[in-house]
Image (tube, rainbow, N blue to C red):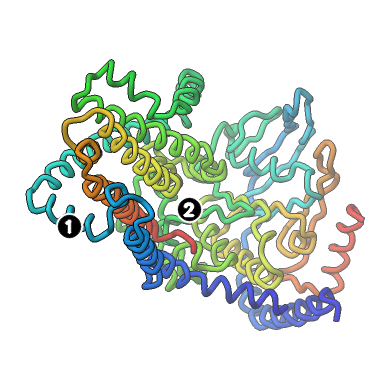
Amino acid sequence: MPQALVGKEISMSALNTVLSFARQQAPQYQLQDRVQRQPGPVDLAIQRVGKTFQLAGENLNVLSDINLDIRSGEFISIVGASGCGKSTLLKLVAGLDTQYEGDIVYQGKRIEGTDLGRGIVFQEHRLFPWLTVEANIELAFSATNVSKPERRKRVQAQIDLVGLSGFEKAYPHQISGGMSQRVAIARALILRPQLLLLDEPFAALDALTRLKLQQELQRLWEHQGLTTILVTHDVEEAVFLGDQVVVMQSHPGRIKRIVPVSLPRPRIRTAPAFHAIRDDVLTDFV
Amino acid sequence: MSIGIRVALGINQADPVFRRRNQLRLVAFLSPLAFILLWWWVSRMEIFPTQLLVSPDAVLLAFLELLDSGELWEHLSVSLSRLGTGFLIGASSGLLFGILMALSRTIEDLFAPLFQALRQVPSIALIPIFILLFGIEEVFKVAIVVKAAFFTVALASYESTKGIPRHYFEVAQAYQLPARKLYTSVVIPAILLPVLTGFRIAFARSWTILVAAELLAADSGLGHMMQMGREMFRIDVVMVGVVLTGLIGFGIDRIFKWGEARLIPWRKA
């Protein structure tokens, strides 16, 4: 029996399980939808941003003329094929790389370095293997003057929020990839940032865990009123989560178009309206 | 599918396997025992002259005799204190130097070529020069141990600090870790395992080079005891030294391994 077929069957039934779970939860989400805030003022302005790498003496233009306004409380998905510069763009917004042309203005100030008000989650969980789950999260407080008992309290609350109670003392190698990524999300959220940056956070996870974490991310986003930028190459994920889907093109990396997603949350992946938007975005890639 | 399951099971079983590997089981004593029996048999057959190849029981007698007279303890304590002093100085300065050279571009540019060239010089080749420079007293023996330990540990800490994934530094940058926190929570834990391995290798080198130096020029120490034994044709005394050198090296290596397992609870099997 072909292996590919077996895998497909499993993921289809798994999908249905998750979907029925989502429907059960639906009324609760709709309640939250009603209190959802209107998009606020422009929080992050990306203006004429370009980025060039030096590679073996040659200039490699990875980002060119990026213009994007992101409003407070919005969820922006950025999709693109690998190599389109979407992760590079996120790094610039995080302040991990400050060598770029143009301006990225966050809350009125040009980004010149990292900021504890902007949390980031990477594709790999990037937890330190020698620190326990709680110590990894608590490390985020290093540059703050939050008191020790307060740190403890908030770490515990955050661990409970991402559903990892009981694993406080576990080392990263003792927990699964999905759990590790939840710890990474908890670490990014512990300082209560206003802007959350996600760089393909679920790409390395299996299909089931990915669906589950996408739901959880949506819950966290609604719960905490975050402005969120998600970089992904998964079109369905982008449409499921984003208020807007920014489609990027390669060589040089640039914005092709921006697709608004005005479906109510939580979105039903099997709904025709959802398919229509997803298929529309997919036409940019196939 | 079944391959996946087997792999998964393998991962689950890996932990006890690792623990077992760290403990000596009874079979571990089979090969030394066989070796002693072979030694005893060869000496009984008198394939070599008995003055040259003494039997294990004669070595044991010599050992008890040396122990009884207090002579052995005297030599041993001198050797071990030289080893301890030299290793402590060499390993700690090597550790610091290696980290600094890996993290500071200036220090690397200044010292890396010299360091890489000097570390190629075998310690034993330096014994004559060290004797000329430091005399044949204590300083020379400690210095040769310092040299052996310094270069091995410095190389291990330099290479492993260089090898810390950039990812870790990006996380540190994102959370703006203060310098002290960066060292205690990121750099030192990241290099601990390779550095401990470096310590073990450095220790083995220090110990052998010290015994060699004592064989060549000393008036005390385990090497000197062996040299005296050879001159007086007491091969049994020489063999006591040989066996002890091996056992001490082995014993301290086990201590390092034990420390490794205790210091690194996050280590995967």
- Give the side of residue A31 with respect to residue B187, left or right: right
Residue A108 is situated, as x and y percent measured from the top left of the image, at 59, 35
Indicate which disc residue B61 carries: 1
Which of these two is toward me, B121 or A62?
B121
Count of numbered circles in the view: 2
Q: Assess disc 1: are there few (<14), some (14-19) or many (≥20) residues with their C-alpha within 10 Å of its C-alpha.
A: some
- Give the side of residue B122 with respect to residue A106, left or right: left
Please say whether residue B252 is visible from this viewpoint: no
Helix, strand or loop at label 2? It is loop
Residue B126 is situated, as x and y percent measured from the top left of the image, at 37, 23
Q: Which chain letter goes with mark 2?
A: A
Q: Which residue is mark 2?
A: A128
Please say whether residue A67 is visible from this viewpoint: yes
Q: Which chain letter goes with mark 1?
A: B
Which of these two is toward me, A197 or B51?
B51
Q: Amino acid at mark 1?
A: Leu
**In the displayed image of the protein, which residue is found farthest to the left?**
B69
Question: For the residues marked 1 and 2, what is the alpha-carbon distance in whole angstroms?
Answer: 55 Å
Residue A59 is situated, as x and y percent measured from the top left of the image, at 78, 26
Helix, strand or loop at label 1? It is helix
